[in-house]
Image (tube, rainbow, N blue to C red):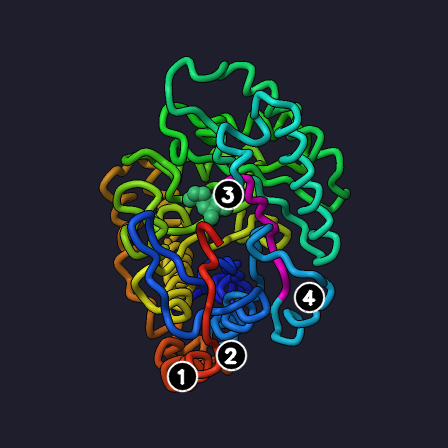
Amino acid sequence: MFSTQAIERLDQQAIEVPSWAYGNSGTRFKVFAQAGVPRDPYEKLADAAQVHALTGLAPSVALHIPWDEVDDFARLVDHAESLGLRIGTINSNTFQDDIYKLGSLAHADADVRQAAIDHHLRCIEVMHATGSTDLKIWLADGTNYPGQDDMRARQDRLAESLATIYERLADDQRLVLEYKFFEPAFYHTDVPDWGTSYTHCVELGERAVVCLDTGHHAPGTNIEFIVTQLLRLGRLGAFDFNSRFYADDDLMVGAADPFQLFRIMHEVNRGGGFEAGSDVVFMLDQCHNIEAKIPGQIRSVLNVQEMTARALLIDQDALADAQGRGDVLGANEVFMDAFYTDVRTALADRREARGLPRDPIAAYAASGYQAEIERARVGGTQAGWGA
Ligand code: LRH
Ligand code: MN
Ligand code: MN
């Protein structure tokens, strides 16, 4: 079914999983506790290792600081390596402390800005200790009411704070700036869209790149166009994948709108994002509030793989030919033919050939791992919001 090049790309596909997906999570209404959830970052890595062992798709784990602070990061790295994993992106959280109520890097008070900068410097230390190359910054900064603060001054302060952090990165480290159009701030957000993120990145330098979280756009936004543009500009650093029906729902990627994921993956392919040497990081950023966490992560990485496989099936020559001839319906048919192709059996065959289970979800259920952690772990923590 697949070309040799497509098989190569699928075999090499790597999707980064977030440590917070394994802990208890929920909404502002309720956090539902699940039996066997991890009590610390070591156990989160052990759970992530299950996902990789059964799919071959998830070799790295993103951490959030301070959720995943430990005394000895060298020990955490050893633990990750013993599980066949590595530590990926380090996310800085400047949204959970009282001092950041009115902002962090864009705050009006220089002392608060300094505290937020210091937190990022701590994240850079963690990156050195873990070998991580990406510092991902998402800011809750913004205002709730018109006139509450000077939006223009906030941009200037933000630019200055980001520059101070950027200067401290090593040559092989990147600053990845994530945008989000609203929430928790409801009137304005200081990095609301890809244009603002891109503008700050260009000002900072070549190692500043944009993170596109699929849940962070207004309804109806053509996300794949943003992917195209950022790849064209050489500034698409990372994805935070998840699904949304309404706002930042953080549901499983590929669940709400697999066609959108397919369209995104086509643009990634078109823009060279799957080529050797591409440094686009494909991360999941989602939580499992009501479903089981490890199977939820397995389902998610398989969804990404399936839509990537379908995108790689697009007959590029036929598509270019139809486009060149102005054959509107013909071009659309070539595109849709690939989307409507069921790749699940072919991917199961490929997994079997690689020594992986044909059905990773069934293999997880049969492994006994879930029963083991439910027996061994008592008092798992809320690893998401409020941890
Ligand atoms: C913000 C966000 C960001 C955070 C994560 C927990 O909505 O997408 O990436 O780090 O959620
Ligand atoms: Mn995100
Ligand atoms: Mn989000």
Distance Cα–Cα, label 3 vs label 1: 33 Å
Q: Nearer the viewer, residue 267 or 377?
A: 377
Q: How many marks?
A: 4
Amino acid carrying label 1: it is: Ala
Image location (x, y in percent) of residue 246: 26, 42
SS under mark 4: helix
Identify the residue under disc 4.
77
**Relative to residue 187, is residue 311 depicted above or below?**
below
Which residue lies at the image location 56% right of the left edge and 25% below the top edge? 107
Q: Magenta residues, as a range?
A: 86-96
Foreground mark, 1 or 4, reads 1
Around disc 2, counting alpha carbons within 10 Å, would you say few (fewer than 14), some (14 to 19), or many (20 or more)? few
Distance Cα–Cα, label 1 vs label 2: 27 Å
What number is the disc on residue 322? none
Distance Cα–Cα, label 3 vs label 2: 43 Å
**Relative to residue 364, is residue 327 depicted above or below?**
above
For the N terminus, the quadrant is: bottom left
Image location (x, y in percent) of residue 314: 37, 54
Foreground mark, 3 or 2, reads 3
Q: Is residue 325 visible?
A: yes
Distance Cα–Cα, label 1 vs label 4: 26 Å
Quadrant in which residue 224 is drawn: top left
SS under mark 2: loop
SS under mark 1: helix
Image location (x, y in percent) of residue 278: 60, 49
Q: Earlier in the sequence, mark 4 or mark 3?
A: 4
Identify the residue under disc 3.
96
Foreground mark, 1 or 2, reads 1
Identify the residue under disc 1.
371
Q: Earlier in the sequence, mark 1 or mark 4?
A: 4
Identify the residue under disc 2.
354
Around disc 3, counting alpha carbons within 10 Å, would you say few (fewer than 14), some (14 to 19), or many (20 or more)? few
